[in-house]
Amino acid sequence: MENKLKELKTILADVDDLQRAASVLNWDQQANMPAAAAEARGYQMGTLSRIAHETFTDEKVGKLLEALKPAAAEMEPDSDDACLIKVTAREYKRSTKVPPEMVAEKAQLTAVGNQAWQEARAKSDFPLFQPHMEKIVDWSKRFAELFAPYDHIYDPLLDGYEPGMKTAEVQAIFDGLKGPQSELIHAIAEKPQVDDSFLHLDFDEQKQWDFGVEAVTQIGYDWKRGREDKVTHPFSTNLGYGDQRITTRVYDDFFNTHLFATLHEAGHALYEQGIGPELARTPLYGGTSLAIHESQSRLWENLVGRSHQFWTFNYPRLQEFFPSQFGNVDLESFYKGINKVEPSFIRVEADEATYNLHIMLRMELEIELLEGKLAVKDLPEVWNERFNQYLGVTPPDDAEGVLQDVHWSFGLYGYFSTYALGNLISVQIWEAVKKDLPDLEDLMAAGKFSDLHKWLREKIYRHGSKFEPQELVQRVTGSKIDGTPYLRYLQSKFGEIYGL
Amino acid sequence: MENKLKELKTILADVDDLQRAASVLNWDQQANMPAAAAEARGYQMGTLSRIAHETFTDEKVGKLLEALKPAAAEMEPDSDDACLIKVTAREYKRSTKVPPEMVAEKAQLTAVGNQAWQEARAKSDFPLFQPHMEKIVDWSKRFAELFAPYDHIYDPLLDGYEPGMKTAEVQAIFDGLKGPQSELIHAIAEKPQVDDSFLHLDFDEQKQWDFGVEAVTQIGYDWKRGREDKVTHPFSTNLGYGDQRITTRVYDDFFNTHLFATLHEAGHALYEQGIGPELARTPLYGGTSLAIHESQSRLWENLVGRSHQFWTFNYPRLQEFFPSQFGNVDLESFYKGINKVEPSFIRVEADEATYNLHIMLRMELEIELLEGKLAVKDLPEVWNERFNQYLGVTPPDDAEGVLQDVHWSFGLYGYFSTYALGNLISVQIWEAVKKDLPDLEDLMAAGKFSDLHKWLREKIYRHGSKFEPQELVQRVTGSKIDGTPYLRYLQSKFGEIYGL
């Protein structure tokens, strides 16, 4: 058994090396690469991914997993080895279901589809993208059928991002949230709007960068095991043990973008930096799901970065960086300004109170598309109608409406819901932290984040992807994923800001 | 046949993708990577190299090459396909000679050996490195034996860097050069030394960088297909079509380092940028040998960058960048300063007139080590003795003597000679260029390098590694590699500068 386990780990280490190498190539493409190399880089990344996939789905892996079953059943279930075998078996099963031709077909459809989407968005012309999206949706249906029987056609798609989660669970959670969150927004809309004009002044890019570096250093980002670079679309990436990088962007005419994107990506990176080094070069060396990952980026971005306590400590320092912009703005006004609620068209710019509604809309539409209840050609109309219903505003055109996000052109169906789940989980975890650290708010107001960071590392980060998302949330918070705490948080925070 | 060739090309494209990916990882390691990731990156690069090697040496490749032999014999010998088959067969034969255990053994010996070398150099304590070097030399002997029978034990090592070259050829060339080059240095030593104190002032790093960017732009480096970054040890790298990067370093107390290193690396990059795009993702997509490559870096660094004409055009501009340093230094003095000849201990800092002697010393010692005529333990003594004989000075310690270069700790025997060959070839090519472009010097003095660049691209760059080095030199210059033109160049240039 020892030998077989060792053999399995050797193969998995190769797969991990290939995948991390592809991540280095991707990071480089976003941060450094000359545009002229796009085609060559595409080949390189394609080859690495293909060989990683072939290596992982080789029948040798299946046989080793089969042979290790009896031994795994005897192991302590929470042990690294037991979890490694469990997670590898799950991923192996999922990966081997899809015939190579379908993988190639998707690569082809989405490469062309993404091109078409780019043009369609630039011209705000949905029909340019429509035939491509039809093919991609059709592919997604056929993909789901590979996993039949299922409870819901959306399940196999969701499962790729949230292992073990069911569509019905997510729908139940969202159903309980949609009404009250919509009501909250309408109630806010009737109150006088807060002023945030001071956030739209001229901000020196280098000063923003420097302040951002101080902020992520404060929350515990380890610069010895990472770095920060500028890109068009910020992301964070784990390039192997000792190398978890963040990327960001800076706008000189709006303060929020850089700082909150940076805290967001640093939140993702703290998670990956906190994974136990003993899990390196295995499939367990990564966050456990997109929703759990997002819970950490949002926790640091919002529950910390948009909190009153964070700015109690940091606002005087920020005023030193930007005296002409913030010198005459008091802490309360600043706090309200960065937490302004206003229905807007673009998801990535949405505030905490409206964000989830963007997601719910997308998930509903995805489900209807997959169920065949909605035709792709009708999408723009339905989008605008439903957008108005949830957010009270109607996009001026498809570029700011149905065409705004890249995801559908890449075939990422079942993906959006993880963003909203992440928000919900972040507050569930926050409540659990506060039980263990009753003076959390005082610590934050004193600029001390190490107890919080330590708690998260101990309870969540170090486990990597040993546990499925629902299981992890249950262990950490004592209940499954639940929208109530998030709703409570929104009502309390924004009730206070808007005097509801 | 068409199908078999296509199949071969598909495998070779995979190998190329894997190797380029490893180069991206290496570039990133030198330019960006946090030190904490060294072990993880080592694994990743090891895995990529191993899979590339396994893929290339798979017996499928051997069978395809065998099957393609008759078709190749019918092809136009200079055609891309004929050269592809020829070069692939040569590399396949070489790669499959070495058993995987020996490859692994070398990786192990040199990993440990390099560690030991670093400590030995830091402490200037050769015995710390001695046992490791003994093992690495022993490995190199066993490696050479795999290629027996040979004319000379050094041949199989040299062949890895200069395909087709024989030790006897190199020795004959060097033998003709050693005496006259030594005499030249002694003659110079008797003349009054030129002044270069103005090169050792304080130079703003950003200004040096900016001037370097102008210079490499002038000689034709295509920034749309590359970029420049700072590293500890400058290099250039080809990361696939459309991406040939240069790296450099900047010292604030010495002018030469940054500019000439940058021109040197840009020279390498011009070569790679000029390779025909149709050769991308094949083994032909790279310079043909280290010596030919070095001939291009040295051509742009020395024959252009250290020429009177280059500075006729560029010196006024340089004076604008550094008025306090160069404002009162006239062009003649500057030209003499950057061409100062002075025997020194460190190869990488050596001037044009002394450089080759450093190389010849190393090649002699390598050969004696491999022939068993010299024991590793006696190396420091012999080094110092012979160094004094050639260069007239004796290193103060082993750190500045036998331990100065990293190469031997990496098992790079047979490698150094390519540096000197590159110098010789650069002048042979220069003479050939001047036949076709009689007004070359006027063009340079007017800041015009495009005709030179075009000539090199046409005659050398575009062919990638289609032709062996001797064959290429013969085609381009009408004769084989020859030291006489280089000697003539040195005597003329330094005779004038030093009034010999």
Image (cartoon, coloured by chain):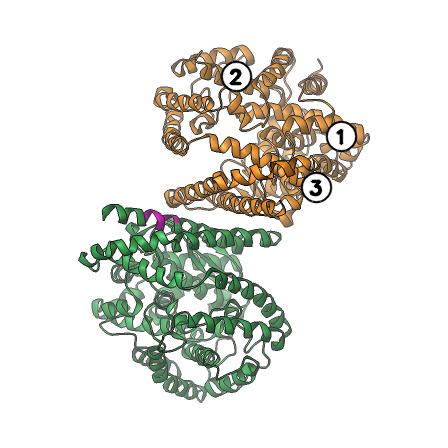
Chain colours: A orange, B green
- The amino acid beneath tag 3 is Gln
- The amino acid beneath tag 1 is Val
* Side of A435 relative to B79 (left or right): right
Chain designation of label 1: A
Relative vertical location of residue B110 with respect to residue A86 in this rendering, above or below: below
Residue B172 appears in which quarter of the rendering?
bottom left
* Side of B451 relative to B380 (left or right): left
* Side of B153 relative to A261 (left or right): left
Q: What's the CA distance linking mark 3 and mark 1?
A: 19 Å
Mark closer to the chain start, 2 or 1 = 2
> How far across and down, in percent of the image, does residue A20 sit?
53, 44
Res A233 label: none
In this view, the mark in front (3 or 2): 2
> How far across and down, in percent of the image, does residue A45 sit?
44, 43
> How far across and down, in percent of the image, does residue A253 sit?
54, 33
Chain designation of label 2: A
- Residue pointed to by mark 2: A152
- Residue pointed to by mark 3: A218
Magenta stretch in the rendered image: B9-14
